């Protein structure tokens, strides 16, 4: 795994190998996308081959930009690479920072640019099995309830977004 991502080392943004950033818990850049159809959000179940949180449900798409890659370009690239989704209008919502243990001694300490994209229920997808094992639409209230009732099925960052940043991400659609 030799993907280089932007991380802060000694206060300076530096290219760092992605696995190293997670092993050391380095603060690094990331993006998250929520594709919405009214009050429903498209979530994905991470492929079993992922090196952390395999098989967990997450938001539509999340990743790390390449060093010197713009966040919105990264969001578009990964929507297509992971889910085969193209042509959506991305709406930047906010930048959030969180730190979470994702298992196996790995830490996500991310500074995340969050985007929301409207789509319809007939959205065309072509799931990349190396990245995504399933995807489904779920009502926001149902997702909030399920993450509370069965937290071990959902990524830590999705739970953080719903618990701490829901109003900024979803506005009036924020779950109860």
Image (cartoon, rainbow, N blue to C red):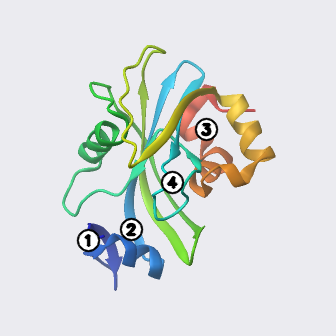
Numbered disc total: 4
Query: SS at mark 4?
Result: loop
Query: Which residue is label 1 attached to?
Result: 2
Query: Which residue is label 2 attached to?
Result: 28
Q: Earlier in the sequence, mark 2 or mark 4?
A: 2
Query: Which residue is label 3 attached to?
Result: 167
Query: SS at mark 2?
Result: strand
Which circle marks residue 151 in the picture?
none
Q: Residue at x 72, y 29 (%)?
A: 141
User: What is the C-alpha distance between the residues marked 1 and 2?
Assistant: 16 Å
Q: Is residue 118 above or below residue 144?
A: above
| Extreme residue in the left direction | 68
User: What is the C-alpha distance between the residues marked 4 and 1?
Assistant: 20 Å
Give the quadrant of the N terminus.
bottom left
Residue 166 locus on image (x, y percent)? 61, 41
Which circle marks residue 48 in the picture?
4
Quarter residue 104 falls in: bottom right
Q: Earlier in the sequence, mark 4 or mark 3?
A: 4
| Extreme residue in the right direction | 149
């Amino acid at each position: 795994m030799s993907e280089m991502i932007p991380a802060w080392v000694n206060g300076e943004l530096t290219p760092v190998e992605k696995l190293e950033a997670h092993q050391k818990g380095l603060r690094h850049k990331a993006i998250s996308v929520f594709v919405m159809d009214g009050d429903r959000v498209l979530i994905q179940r991470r492929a079993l081959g992922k090196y952390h949180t395999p098989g967990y449900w997450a938001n539509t798409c999340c990743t790390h930009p390449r060093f010197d890659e713009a966040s919105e370009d990264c969001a578009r690239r990964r929507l297509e690479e992971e889910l085969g989704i193209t042509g959506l209008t991305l709406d930047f919502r906010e930048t959030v920072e969180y730190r979470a243990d994702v298992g196996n001694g790995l830490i996500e300490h991310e500074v995340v640019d969050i985007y929301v994209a409207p789509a319809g229920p007939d959205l065309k997808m072509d799931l990349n099995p190396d990245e995504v094992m399933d995807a489904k639409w779920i009502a926001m209230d149902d997702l909030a309830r399920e993450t509370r009732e069965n937290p071990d099925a959902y990524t830590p960052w999705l739970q953080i977004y719903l618990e701490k940043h829901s109003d900024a991400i979803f506005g009036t659609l924020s779950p109860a």
